[in-house]
């Protein structure tokens, strides 16, 4: 879907945390997973910057493994703090999603709001 | 996948240049960024300090991360049919943490803030101060020059020049007082 980037800004961190929670993964593999999910068009730089931020905020556990390119490749898994952050993200998402669905399904919004 | 030596050198150079921008962005929260934008002095110090970041272990690690990430991206692009050069150009474009755009957004934000905070009444007040002081200075100077030169008789016999000098001096004093009041007004507003 096009023109998603603005809406994704607030939730991309949660999406990436969820992807990492599924198992050990390296940086660019996350981009490929996002593309496979249909989130094409997310700037590659955005994901890289996000991974740096997750690392700085100590939400991920990192294992370095040798790569064929030269420098070691980082593999990410969620640590406890990351898992807590992911749970918090889904709680916020559920709240937001529920409210939006209520708004969408309510025929006469004047009565509700 | 390995790249030719020239491309690999370009990737390394790119990573060295860009890793610092990504590190800076990751180190600061949104609120810190806002605070930085209003603090030029801090920014200048940061720029000076950032010279040392290129050689720190943290920067080296970020550079290595970017090299790996960029190489993976380029390999992906090449598997889609792009040449090495084309893949590098695209990856460079996508992964650039442009400091130029940061600067332009900073200027744009200041521009918006300036006009958002603009109050016409303040400018009217400053203008009235200038006008008031200039008129008072002009009249007082002219009167003093006229009186000290000897009044009406002397004025008509060439003494008008003293009135003129007095008026000019009064005008300058009026402008000076206007500038002082403007300065006091601005400094009070900044507090």
Image: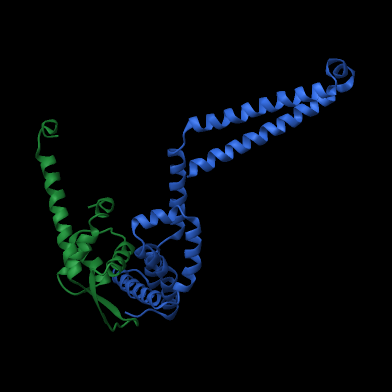
Judged left or right of residue A36, residue B184 is: right
Q: Which quadrant of the view contains residue A13? A: bottom left
Q: How many marks?
A: 0
Please give the name of the residue rendered at 76% of the width and 22% of the height, measured from the top-left corner. B143
Q: Is residue A103 above or below residue A31?
A: above
Colour in which chain A is drawn: green
Q: Is residue B9 above or below residue B28?
A: below
Q: Which residue occupies the foreground of this view, A85 or A44?
A: A85
Q: Position of residue A103 (x, y in %)?
A: 13, 40
Q: Which residue occupies the foreground of this view, A36 or A10?
A: A10
Q: Is residue A28 above or below residue A102?
A: below
Q: Residue furthest right?
A: B157
Please give the name of the residue rendered at 38% of the width and 78% of the height, measured from the top-left corner. B3
The chain letter of the blue chain reads B
Q: Which quadrant of the view contains residue B31? A: bottom left
Judged left or right of residue A22, residue B189 is: right
Tell me if residue A20 can be seen. Answer: no
Q: Position of residue B98 (x, y in %)?
A: 43, 60
Q: Is residue A30 above or below residue B128?
A: below
Q: Which residue occupies the foreground of this view, A81 or B71?
A: A81
Please give the name of the residue rendered at 83% of the width and 18% of the height, measured from the top-left corner. B151
**Which quadrant is home to the C terminus of chain A?**
top left
Judged left or right of residue B150, residue B30 is: left
Look at the image and name its color scheme.
by chain
Q: Position of residue B120 (x, y in %)?
A: 49, 31
Judged left or right of residue A113, residue B65 is: right
Q: Which residue occupies the foreground of this view, B177 or A60?
A: B177
Q: Position of residue A92 (x, y in %)?
A: 16, 54
Tell me if residue B11 can be seen. Answer: yes
Q: Which quadrant of the view contains residue B78? A: bottom left
């Amino acid at each position: 879907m096009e023109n998603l980037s603005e809406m994704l800004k607030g939730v991309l961190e949660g999406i990436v945390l969820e992807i990492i929670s599924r198992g050990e993964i390296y940086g660019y593999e996350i981009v490929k997973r996002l593309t496979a999910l249909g989130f094409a068009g997310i700037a590659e730089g955005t994901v890289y910057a996000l991974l740096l931020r997750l690392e700085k905020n100590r939400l991920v556990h990192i294992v370095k493994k040798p790569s064929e390119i030269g420098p070691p490749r980082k593999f990410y898994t969620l640590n406890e703090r990351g898992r807590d952050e992911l749970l918090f993200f889904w709680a916020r998402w559920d709240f937001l999603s529920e409210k939006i669905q209520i708004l969408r399904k309510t025929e006469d919004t004047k009565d509700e709001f | 996948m390995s790249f030719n030596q020239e491309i690999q050198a370009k990737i390394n150079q790119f990573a060295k240049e860009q890793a610092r921008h990504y590190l800076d962005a990751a180190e600061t929260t949104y609120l810190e960024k806002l605070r930085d934008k209003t603090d030029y002095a801090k920014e200048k110090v940061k720029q000076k300090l950032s010279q040392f970041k290129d050689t720190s272990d943290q920067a080296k690690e970020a550079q290595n991360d970017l090299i790996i990430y960029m190489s993976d991206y380029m390999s992906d692009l090449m598997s889609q049919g792009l040449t090495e050069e084309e893949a590098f150009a695209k990856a460079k474009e996508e992964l650039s943490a442009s400091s130029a755009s940061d600067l332009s957004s900073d200027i744009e934000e200041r521009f918006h803030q300036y006009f958002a905070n603009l109050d016409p009444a303040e400018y009217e007040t400053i203008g009235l101060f200038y006008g008031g002081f200039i008129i008072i200075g002009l009249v007082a100077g002219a009167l003093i020059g006229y009186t000290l030169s000897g009044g009406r008789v002397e004025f008509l016999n060439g003494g008008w020049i003293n009135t003129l000098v007095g008026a000019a001096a009064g005008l300058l004093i009026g402008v000076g007082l206007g500038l002082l009041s403007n300065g006091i007004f601005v400094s009070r507003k900044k507090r």
